[in-house]
Image (tube, rainbow, N blue to C red):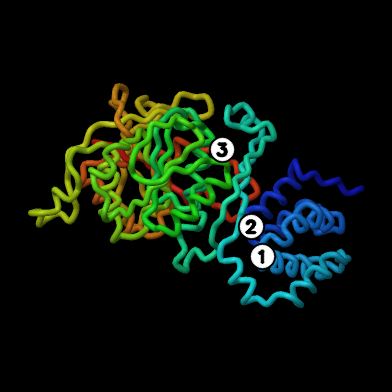
Amino acid sequence: MAEKELDSTAPPGLHLVSAFLAMETTDALLCLARECGGGKVTEKVQRFIWDHCLTKALGKGNESYLKKFIKKLITEVESKHCNVLDELYEQYASYMTFFKDDKLVKENERLCKCISFLFSGDCFELSVCPRSGKLVVPLQCSLNMLEGDTGCSIWPSSLFLSELILSFPHIFSGKSCFEVGSGVGLIGICLAHVKASKVILSDGDLSTLANMKINLEMNQLNVETGLQQTSTKNENVVKCIHLPWESASEKELKDFMPEIILGADVIYDPSCLPYLIQVLLILLNKKKSCDENHEGSSKKSSPKVSCADCKLNGSIRGQDLSPHDSESSSSYAYDINTSGIKTITADATGLRTRAAPVAYIASVIRNINTFNHFLALADQADLKITDLTSTLRPLDLFPYMKSYDRSSIRLFTVSSK
């Protein structure tokens, strides 16, 4: 049987190219390459990789990644006693001759990845779906996620919230949105794409904020800085502010008061959680901040305030999913691995007439004690945590991304009791 021609605009070729642009692991790339070749990396697949991936990336600063991939690709082909393209041998020899590993790593502390959102099937009906069926977002980011550069890394929950925004654009379109801990800015770029009326991104780290601005500009968005509000209505303007949670004040944020707050993987450091709760309280339009309740509380370590009500509007692929519908999201207890995590009630009754802000928080629960601490602080602050993980499911826009485990991510809303 003749080997099928590969197309870079359709699977499986599209998936391989998208994974390469996103700098997926070399093992993931080889897995996709085998799929393209019916189980092995044939000469035709190698030629496709050379033409559509490697030649377009040479000289663009990703030499360390390219060297590792080419080495593994050659090893894979040789192990199957197949012919290796001369170009692959020549390029690897060039890297061995002119680049040392320590130089490659140093040069590539910040790399440009391209995250491709792939729309297919029913997705084409979405108003935000490009004609090509593909939305490509270039991002300058770091590979050193665990070496003090976490803010410039792409975290799983930011991918999840980005999928959520593009899957349910009507939730965010025309809304004022504020993200806490914005990192590389991916969520803000997606909010701008679905035409949120206002997009405010924030981060407490200045180097992360500077990198975020670069990413916004790479995606043809105008960047506005500083806390002062402006009257511009340009939908391509995204506001970036420096916001350390520990010093955030109601005076500083009172002019923003968004309709929707977002946070991706922000529940990770127990020492930061009281400050995160305080920021959420301010943005959810509370009249009292956390600090007012710290003093004189001998039994509780976090603030308790009175909160207003909130409303969440959404739908699942054309079906009405507003949590004000008691049948679509009833009360239930949420438990993870039954290993001691506190329960979260998700009671959506009685929200029909409420219209206060709501926060969407996506998180991988890496430490149950840390997450329980967040729940306790939220409860003491009279905030309600609603679990929408099984109710509001985004479309799979990353079918090529084998490193992305959507099942590990939980989606919550934070609102007033």
Tell me which numbered mark, 2 or 1, is placed earlier along the sequence.
2
In the rendered image, the vertical position of residue 167 relative to residue 30, given as above or below: above
* Labels 3, 1: front one: 1
Quadrant that contains the C terminus: top left
Q: Residue 151 vs residue 100: left or right? A: left
Q: Give the image location of residue 403, x and y in percent.
A: 58, 56
Q: Would you call the spot at circle 1 few (<14 residues within 10 Å), some (14-19), or many (20 or more)? A: some
Q: Quadrant of residue 110?
A: bottom right
Q: Residue at x 53, y 51 (%)?
A: 214
Q: Write down the residue under mark 3.
A: 395
**Which one is earlier in the sequence, the residue at label 2 or at label 3?**
2
Q: Which residue is mark 1?
A: 65
- Check disc 2 and report the residue beneath it: 23
Within-10-Å neighbours for mark 3: few <14, some 14–19, many 20+: many
Q: Is residue 135 above or below residue 31?
A: above
Tell whether 297 sits left or right of 78: left
- Residue 302 spot, x, y in % from top left: 19, 53
Residue visible at 45% across and 39% down?
A: 390
335 or 64: nearer the viewer? 64
Secondary structure, mark 2, is loop
How far apart are labels 3 and 1 at the CA level?
29 Å
